[in-house]
Image (spheres, grey):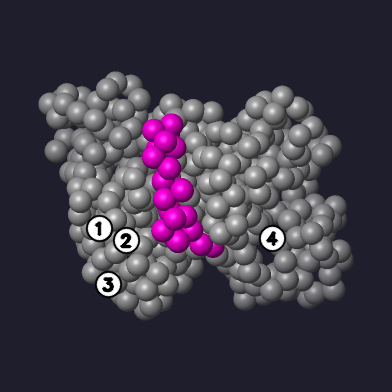
């Protein structure tokens, strides 16, 4: 796609002035709300309606969750535990949401896409990407992680596709170390990278050694954000894949996203190359044959869909019933803030439910609990974290959220899964716990200065647009 540099930079200068003015006018940081959360290593969430997403435990209308040392010790009613209490009355307790595909760095220019040919999504990514400094990736990723934390997302897959240098990779990872969500960091090629050139395989090795083997980001694991057959030639995709497997890294590909990609048969080619395994994630995959869906299912690979971005970019209507009924492991994501604007994964749950029923032309074809599974336990399995998070199960790490039942937007609650999938938004998330650490309490983030993060991001964007 051709893009006019003069048009982008001219529009960028005007936008830079607006962003700078907004940053200067931003209010000072608000004081955190009253009522401090317990800082103890051990506590009990008491009296919540527990939606465990564990088929053995089920739902507990008046349940407790005992947490010690970042781990779930017990889930049940009236647990006899002497430990500080987190009041769960009037709340729904459930596993934290898991987003399986998100280009965090593009949050730097949220909702900037699709206003003109110059701001069409891919053109905009290249225009902003090629002049992005390492600090720009830091600010974009940090804002995204704070947004995720606020909305109830406790695990995120950072599909980082603008790593222009080792310094860019380090800056992106510093945002993760600072905010501290769980997830996967997938190392990708920078915007504008030639299809004939390999990703920086030596820097992937360095990042693995210096960041992951050294334990600097203990809640993250490393992956490869790859390019599939049909997008690049074998001389590129094969050594990239083979290096990832040599290093023990999972791989992720945007594949069969458009009709043209479907005709190329990217997923068919991945299967023919023995590149579909349980460690392979496919993104979008809207245009697949029955044989390709069977190959994905039988290989144990997973698919991450992002219905909002797929609609807004014009890929088409996500064929949710066809994909889910094929038996593939299907999960959800918000994808990119420059295109969709909102990191509210709850809205993706609603849209996915609507697409499933609308395309099938059947109201009762799917229940909301099935959609919740896509954003919790199934998402955890797809990222190789099924034994770690995704359900409120004793022995797993304590990633959980509390949703208020008596808010104007959620009351009255008659069907808890329906309330979660159809009525809940970020504003109803009262408490967010990541690895046992309480990060949001009584509706406010407890250890992040939101206003400071926003001001710094706005300043970074103004500088990028002015360059």
Residue at point 41%, 58% (across, down): 273
Dot 1 or dot 4, earlier in sequence: 1
Q: Residue furthest bottom?
A: 214
Residue at point 29%, 21% (across, down): 116
Dot 2 or dot 4, earlier in sequence: 2
User: Circle 2: is it few (<14), some (14-19), or many (20+) Cα within 10 Å?
Assistant: some
**Magenta segment, which residues?**
257-278
Rendered image: mark on residue 425: none
- SS category of the residue bearing label 2: helix
Dot 1 or dot 3, earlier in sequence: 3
In the depicted view, which residue is nearer to us: 426 or 173? 173
Query: Tag count in the figure?
Result: 4
Quadrant including the C terminus: top left
- Is the residue under label 1 in contact with that under label 2 (CB below 8 Å)? yes
Residue that numbered label 3 is attached to: 206
Q: CA distance from mark 2 to mark 1?
A: 6 Å
Q: CA distance from mark 2 to mark 4?
A: 36 Å
Residue 380 in the image: state x and y as whole percent.
59, 59
Rendered image: mark on residue 235: 1
Name the quadrant containing residue 411. Answer: top right
Residue at point 51%, 33% (across, down): 308
Q: CA distance from mark 3 to mark 2?
A: 20 Å
Q: Nearer the viewer, mark 1 or mark 4?
A: 1
Residue 97 in the image: state x and y as whole percent.
60, 51
Residue that numbered label 2 is attached to: 238
- SS category of the residue bearing label 4: loop
Q: Residue furthest top?
A: 116
Residue 147 in the image: state x and y as whole percent.
47, 46
Residue that numbered label 4 is attached to: 391
- SS category of the residue bearing label 3: helix
Residue 339 belongs to magenta span: no
């Amino acid at each position: 796609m051709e893009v006019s540099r003069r048009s982008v930079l001219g529009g960028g200068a005007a936008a830079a002035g607006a962003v700078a003015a907004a940053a200067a006018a931003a209010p000072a940081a608000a004081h955190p709300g009253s009522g401090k959360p317990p800082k103890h290593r051990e506590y009990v969430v008491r009296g919540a309606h527990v939606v465990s997403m564990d088929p053995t435990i089920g739902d507990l209308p008046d349940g407790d969750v005992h947490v010690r040392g970042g781990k779930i010790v017990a889930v049940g009613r009236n647990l006899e535990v002497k430990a500080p209490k987190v009041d769960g009355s009037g709340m729904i307790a459930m596993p934290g949401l898991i987003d399986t595909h998100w280009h965090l760095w593009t949050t730097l220019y949220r909702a900037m896409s699709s206003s003109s040919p110059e701001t069409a999504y891919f053109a905009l990514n290249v225009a902003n990407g090629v002049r992005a400094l390492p600090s720009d990736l830091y600010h974009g990723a940090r804002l995204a992680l704070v947004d995720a934390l606020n909305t109830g997302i406790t695990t995120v897959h950072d599909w980082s596709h603008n790593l222009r240098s080792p310094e860019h990779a380090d800056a992106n990872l510093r945002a993760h170390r600072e905010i501290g969500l769980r997830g996967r960091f997938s190392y990708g090629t920078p915007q504008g990278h030639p299809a004939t050139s390999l990703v920086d395989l030596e820097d992937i090795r360095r990042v693995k050694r210096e960041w992951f083997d050294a334990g600097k980001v203990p809640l993250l694991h490393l992956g490869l954000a790859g390019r599939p057959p049909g997008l690049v030639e074998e001389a590129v995709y094969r050594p990239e894949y083979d290096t990832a497997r040599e290093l023990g890294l999972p791989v992720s590909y945007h594949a069969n996203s458009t009709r043209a990609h479907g005709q190329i048969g990217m997923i068919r080619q991945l299967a023919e190359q023995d590149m579909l395994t349980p460690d392979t994630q496919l993104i979008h995959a809207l245009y697949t044959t029955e044989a390709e869906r069977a190959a994905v299912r039988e290989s144990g690979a997973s698919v991450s869909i992002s219905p909002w971005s797929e609609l807004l970019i014009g890929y088409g209507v996500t064929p949710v019933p066809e994909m889910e009924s094929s038996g593939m492991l299907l999960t959800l994501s918000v994808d990119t803030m420059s295109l969709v604007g909102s990191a509210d994964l709850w809205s993706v749950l609603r849209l996915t439910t609507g697409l499933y029923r609308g395309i099938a032309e059947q109201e009762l074809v799917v229940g909301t609990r099935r959609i919740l599974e896509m954003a919790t336990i199934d998402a955890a399995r797809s990222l190789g974290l099924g034994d770690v998070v995704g359900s409120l199960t004793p022995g797993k790490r304590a990633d959980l959220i509390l949703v208020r039942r008596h808010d104007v937007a959620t009351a009255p609650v008659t069907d808890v899964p329906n309330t979660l999938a159809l009525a809940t938004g970020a504003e109803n998330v009262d408490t967010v716990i990541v690895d046992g650490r309480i990060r949001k309490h009584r509706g406010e983030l407890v250890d992040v200065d939101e206003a400071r993060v926003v001001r710094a991001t706005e300043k970074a964007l103004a500088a990028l647009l002015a360059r």
